[in-house]
Image (cartoon, helix red, strand yellow):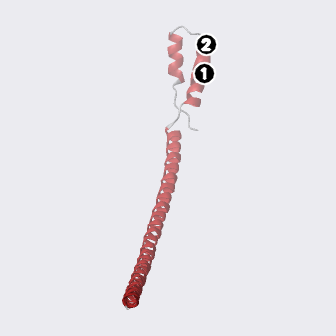
């Protein structure tokens, strides 16, 4: 650690002019000099700290870029999966519509056949009724 320059001679002269004796002056100057050198950061200390902070900042920047890349890749992957799922669902809906249309046509055909069968049966019943009435009438009027 680099020492901060502290002018001990100037401090000692100032203290002596203020009335401090040699022992007091020496004690105060040593105490101040020691405190300044132990607690004040030098330019070199600040440079080391700055380089350390810059290094950590670049590391964090790199982590953010990596995370951004991962998020982007995940987004693209999910977009593709969602698109594929949508296409699959469209295909399934188309198949369901097709099956429903075929079922509807089948039901229509069966209903028409049933209607025709009922018309024929109703006609036969009417014919039988007419014959019965004619037969009963013949029997009653003969």
Looking at marks 1 and 2 on the same chain, the residue that comes earlier in the sequence is marked by 2
Q: Position of residue 117 (x, y in %)?
A: 41, 87
Which residue is pictured at 40% across the width and 87% down the height?
136
The answer to which of 101 and 113 lies nearer the viewer is 113
Q: Is residue 63 above or below residue 19?
A: below
Q: Position of residue 142 (x, y in %)?
A: 38, 92
How many tags in the picture?
Answer: 2
- The part of the image, by quadrant, that contains residue 25 is top right
Locate residue 24 relative to residue 68 in the image: left or right. Answer: right
- The part of the image, by quadrant, that contains residue 88 is bottom left
Which residue is pictured at 52% across the width and 42% down the height?
49
Disc 1 packing (10 Å; few <14; some 14–19; many ≥20): few
Q: Residue furthest top?
A: 19
Residue that carries the numbered disc 1 in the rendered image:
31
Q: Is residue 36 above or below residue 90?
A: above
The answer to which of 118 and 85 lies nearer the viewer is 118
Residue that carries the numbered disc 2 in the rendered image:
24
Give how far apart the Cα atoms at labels 1 and 2 are.
11 Å
Q: Residue furthest front?
A: 142
Q: Is residue 117 above or below residue 48?
A: below
Cβ–Cβ under 8 Å for marks 1 and 2: no
- Disc number lying in front (1 or 2): 1
Q: Position of residue 82 (x, y in %)?
A: 45, 68
Question: Helix, strand or loop at disc 2?
Answer: helix
Q: Position of residue 18 (x, y in %)?
A: 51, 9
Disc 2 packing (10 Å; few <14; some 14–19; many ≥20): some
Question: Helix, strand or loop at disc 1?
Answer: helix
Locate residue 55 relative to residue 26 in the image: left or right. Answer: left
The answer to which of 103 and 77 lies nearer the viewer is 103
* Numbered label attached to residue 142: none
Figure quadrant of the N terminus:
top right
């Amino acid at each position: 650690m680099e020492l901060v320059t502290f002018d001990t001679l100037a401090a000692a002269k100032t203290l002596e002019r203020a009335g401090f004796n040699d022992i007091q002056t020496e004690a105060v100057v040593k105490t101040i000099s020691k405190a300044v050198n132990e607690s004040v950061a030098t330019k070199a200390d600040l440079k080391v700290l700055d380089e350390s902070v810059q290094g950590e900042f670049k590391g964090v920047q790199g982590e953010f870029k990596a995370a951004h890349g991962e998020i982007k890749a995940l987004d693209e992957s999910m977009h593709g999966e969602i698109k594929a799922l949508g296409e699959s669902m469209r295909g399934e809906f188309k198949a369901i519509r097709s099956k429903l249309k075929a079922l509807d046509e089948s039901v229509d055909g069966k209903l028409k056949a049933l209607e025709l069968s009922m018309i024929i049966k109703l006609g036969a019943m009417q014919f039988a009724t007419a014959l019965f009435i004619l037969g009963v009438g013949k029997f009653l009027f003969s």
